[in-house]
């Protein structure tokens, strides 16, 4: 994490604390040592540091809250690299949900409706969620049942590709419904 600096109260820069205590920064009197080529067990901090030094590796505190703290004898830079790599992999595996919006008016005609239906089919096939809503301008709120019928018809036409996650619900001047893609 070199490169990140905080300013102390005199405006001078000081390096940011490392995310793990390593070598002489470990303050415990004794530690539980693990790692390759090491007899696991509880050692005094001086013995543990000597073990790490003999292998030209670092003593890294990996579980500071344990009693005694758990330290691993490893190459610290390699350890940080592997942690970063793990985080990257987890981030890549996280599912990114895309929500596509489709807007209707309460009096959407057939041609417009079919055009928007085709878009919704495409979005669901791509694995995106569809947020369909009817926007009521001015006094058109009087047609809220028309809007609900429109959204329910929309959901019915998309039945093969997606399932309704949230039934039509009126929020202010919008009636909203969510449709999620069906798992293939």
Image (cartoon, rainbow, N blue to C red):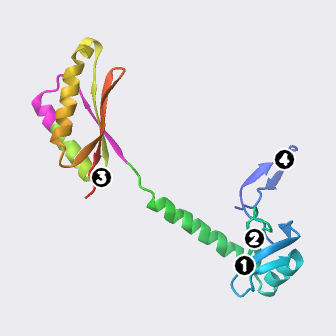
Which quadrant holds the N terminus? Answer: bottom right
**Residue 147 vertical position relative to residue 17 in the rendered view, above or below:** above
Q: Nearer the viewer, mark 3 or mark 4?
A: 3
**Could you tell me which residue is drawn at 21 percent across and 49 percent down?**
161
Q: Is residue 106 visible?
A: no
Contact check, label 2 and label 4, Cβ < 8 Å: no
User: Does the segment drawn in magenta span residue 106?
Assistant: yes
**Could you tell me which residue is drawn at 72 percent across and 61 percent down?**
19
* CA distance separating discs 1 and 2: 7 Å
Point out residue 90 in the picture as x, y percentages from the top left corner: 50, 62
Contact check, label 1 and label 2, Cβ < 8 Å: yes
Judging by the rendered image, the residue that carries numbered circle 4 is 8
Q: Is residue 69 left or right of 179 when viewed as pictured?
A: right
Kindly state the secondary structure of the residue where label 4 is placed.
Answer: loop
Q: Nearer the viewer, mark 2 or mark 4?
A: 2
Write down the region rendered in magenta: 98-114
């Amino acid at each position: 994490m070199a490169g990140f600096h905080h300013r102390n109260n005199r405006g001078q820069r000081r390096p940011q604390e490392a995310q793990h205590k390593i070598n002489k920064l470990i303050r415990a009197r004794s530690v539980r040592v693990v790692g390759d080529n090491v007899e696991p067990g509880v050692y005094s901090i001086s013995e543990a540091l000597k073990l790490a030094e003999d292998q030209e590796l670092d003593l890294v505190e990996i579980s500071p809250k344990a009693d005694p703290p758990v330290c691993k004898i490893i190459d610290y830079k390699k350890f940080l690299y592997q942690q970063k790599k793990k985080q990257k992999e987890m981030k890549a595996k996280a599912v990114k949900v895309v929500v596509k919006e489709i807007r209707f008016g309460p009096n959407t005609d057939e041609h417009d409706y079919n055009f928007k239906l085709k878009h919704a089919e495409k979005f669901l096939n791509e694995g995106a969620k569809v947020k369909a809503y009817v926007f009521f301008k001015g006094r058109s709120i009087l047609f809220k049942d028309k809007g609900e019928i429109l959204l329910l018809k929309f959901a019915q036409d998309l039945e093969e590709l997606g399932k309704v996650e949230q039934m039509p619900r009126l929020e202010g001047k919008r009636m909203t419904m969510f449709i999620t893609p069906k798992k293939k």
